[in-house]
Amino acid sequence: MKKIQEPGIARKGFIPLCVPYLCGNEWKYIKECLDTNWVSSAGSFVDRFEQDLAKYVGAKYGVACVNGTAALHISLILLGIGYNDEVITSDMTFVAPANAIRYVGAYPVFIDANYKTFQIDSAKLKDFLKNKCKNTKEGLLNKETKRIIKAILPVHILGHCCDMEEIMDISRQYGLPVVEDATEALGAKFSGKYAGTFGKLGVFSFNGNKIITTGGGGMIVTDDKNLAQKAKYLTTQAKDDSIEFIHNEIGYNYRLPNILAAMGCAQLENLEKHINKKRKTA
């Protein structure tokens, strides 16, 4: 029988780009959850993880989610993206942004990546908006599909940032809100500002292959209190009463368990170590 490679053990000559790095208080914090029975969707580590990550990137609010895709889904809902709308994103990305766009009934419009940076090409984005779209009373119309473009979803990949100055200029010029997929760029900066904090909403992921991991998890960050409150409401089943099970709109079971948030808190304490380790690997 062929021997199965153990997780986290690199084969000879193999460069472990995405192996989780556990070097701090993970065992201690997880044991605290087990000892106190706070293992599910409520607990002090959830609040702490939200606050600590938001503080690190310089955002006012953080809302933990079960994964990055769920965080993207909720972010699009918060911006009112819906049936037959379009959202611009990069063609150099994992499938999650496209899936989240389709979850809300909208369609992705893919813009080519810059072949030198692998990030969305802002020059091609400008060209598309200038030559393939027009302003109408309903909004910015894609002349080919006859659909209205509602947002830009740039994806920061491989630990680097998109040209956010250009993208935010384009956002203001065309009135398109920005949701940043910063799932691969926690800790990365553009012009001194952290990825995920340029647009109305930023999204991070804590899957096993990300900068830090909770096993599985995500986070929405924003400076908008109303958006943060709505995100928390929607990700916790849209429950209108703290005791009674009263729901007046569709909610989602997108909560991050306390035991995973505990791991996130431990990982975040050593974020700079994680980043430096990945830089050395690169």
Image (tube, grey):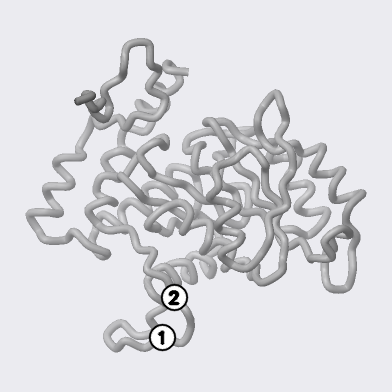
Tell me how many marks there are: 2
The answer to whether 152 is drawn above or below residue 15 in the figure is below
Disc 2 + disc 1, Cβ < 8 Å: yes
Q: Is residue 249 left or right of residue 119?
A: left
Which residue is situated farthest in the left direction here? 35
Q: Nearer the viewer, residue 188 or 153?
A: 153
User: In which quadrant of the rendered view does residue 106 lie?
Assistant: bottom right
SS at mark 1? loop
Residue placed under numbered mark 2 in the picture: 251
The percent position of residue 143, horizontal first and vertical second, equals 89, 59
| 107 with respect to 40 (left or right) | right
Q: Which mark is residue 220?
A: none
Which quadrant would the N terminus be assigned to in this image?
Answer: top left
**For the point 49% across and 65% down, which residue is it?**
228
Towards the viewer: 223 or 102: 102
Q: Nearer the viewer, residue 156 or 225?
A: 156
Name the residue rendered at 42%, 71% in the picture: 252
Inspect the image, locate mark 1, and give the three-letter code of the amino acid beneath it. Answer: His
Measured from the top left, where is residue 102 in percent x and y? 60, 61
Residue that carries the numbered disc 1 in the rendered image:
247
Residue lying farthest to the front in this orientation: 1
Q: Position of residue 141 (x, y in %)?
A: 85, 63
Residue in the image at 39% along x and 75% along y: 237
Label 2 neighbourhood size at 10 Å, few (<14), some (14-19), many (20+)?
some
Q: Amino acid at mark 2?
A: Gly
Whether residue 23 sits left or right of residue 140 in the image: it is left
Residue at left 22%, top 53%? Answer: 259
Query: Considering only vertical position in the picture, is 121 above or below 245?
Result: above
Snapshot quadrant of residue 191: top right
Residue 205, position as x, y percentages in the image: 44, 46
